[in-house]
Image (tube, helix red, strand yellow):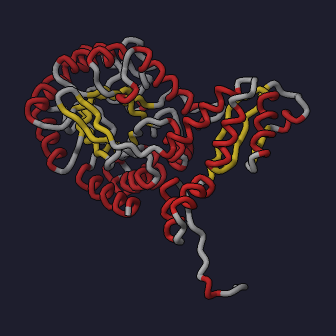
Amino acid sequence: MKGNKDHNLRVVMIESRDDAYHALVDVGCDNPGVKWMTPKAVHRVIKVKKLSVKGAIILKQEMLSKGGEAALSRGAGNFSVADTDVLLMGTLRQYRELCKKLKMQPFGLRQLADEIQDVLDNIEQKEVRTLPCRDLSLTLGERTLVMGILNVTPDSFSDGGKYFDPGVAVEHAHQMVEEGADIIDLGGESTRPSTWSEEPLSAEEEVHRLLPVLKRLVQEIKVPISIDTYKAETARATLDAGAHMINDIWGFQCDPEIAAVAAEYDVPVILMHNQDGIEYEEMMGDIFAFLRRSVAIAQDAGVKPEQIILDPGIGFGKDTQQNLTVMRHLREFRSLGKPMLLGTSRKATIGKTLNLPPDQRLEGSLATIVWGVSQGAADIVRVHDVKESVRAVRMTEAIVSG
């Protein structure tokens, strides 16, 4: 090894403004210097989809003038394409100066400046706030919340109908709360992809399964109860019976009436990415576009922006490798500016990766949860094994938070 070994060099990982602040303070930098250099120490890469070539060339020139970089498609250079994706690379300070200049430019660059600032603000966001859930509430951003899964179905992939009996289901809900569950997610229809070719369960039957359990739980436990449904009729019936949240695996893009029901009852909603098949133009971009549409549908119906939680949909509309790719990119979902739910428990991706049946996927499930928490992309984790998951989450938070 060359050089003076006495300097004890190391690479410092700067992922956020907080990281930059502490690194600068650690070297003894004075307060004005810390304020000036913090945005210089944080580097971000932003992907812009389908910008006009004229706008992209101006964007590149402006980014280069600030000391950053911008990559365009090969066809943009000779105008052989009408639009191009752009990959921007720069520090927070360079982006700040870039946005000032873009606000004076044509070709949609004024709006782009606002969008760039929004995603940069979102990725840094660490807000602690209260989420009202009718007569109860949750605190988001302080720690990762654990949602316990309660399937009252005869054909659940993970438990094979173990809790189909209402009495057994209620007892299990009590156990999950005792083990540390912050939310109970109650579902009456199996949502495993292999059932999609079958006749959908009627809302009437779904409600028939849910209500006996729900009516007892709202009286007996003191944590919010989420209803796992994509049907407006089921949502209305269960909210009438006292449910606190709606968890829609189709992100309000299946039943056109469910968003209005959620807005009417003024409850939080969880909107998951989903699709038929596994074909994408550009997977991560397509997932982001889907979730943004879901947010727009919810807000247009009257759901308050602060009531929306998003879910990348691990195990839905994706094969094993695609699920693993989404997991690797979890941190990127912070740029959407919404709390994130991660639901990986006992999923087929774990089973296929480790060659294990559902009842032997605990360790794999915990690994995915730990990863999500470490990436700052799991405000809520949806799990079958509450006790073990709570312990894994708290240990991960202790490491990450210091």
Corner quadrant of residue 268: top left
Relative placement, left or right, of 299 versus 49 is: left
Query: Is residue 20 or residue 292 the one in the foreground?
Result: 20
Q: Residue at x 56, y 63 (%)?
A: 13
Q: Residue at x 40, y 21 (%)?
A: 198
Residue 347 at what x, y percent from top left? 40, 44
Tell me the quadrant of the picture where the N terminus can be found: bottom right
> How many numbered discs?
0
- Residue furthest to the right in view is 78
Q: Residue at x 47, y 36 (%)?
A: 337
Tell me the quadrant of the picture where the C terminus can be found: bottom left
Relative placement, left or right, of 157 versus 94 is: left
Report if residue 356 is visible in the image. no
Query: Is residue 113 or residue 295 the one in the foreground?
Result: 113
Query: Is residue 97 or residue 326 the one in the foreground?
Result: 97
In the image, residue 28 sits, relative to residue 143, either above or below, namely below
Relative placement, left or right, of 223 versus 335 is: left
Relative placement, left or right, of 50 versus 286 is: right
In the image, residue 51 sits, relative to residue 346, either above or below, namely above
Report if residue 106 is visible in the image. yes
Residue 170 at what x, y percent from top left? 13, 36
Residue 386 at what x, y percent from top left? 25, 49
In the image, residue 9 sits, relative to residue 308, either above or below, namely below
Corner quadrant of residue 63: top right
Q: Residue at x 46, y 34 (%)?
A: 316
Residue 258 at what x, y percent from top left? 36, 16
Query: Is residue 282 or residue 107 the one in the foreground?
Result: 107
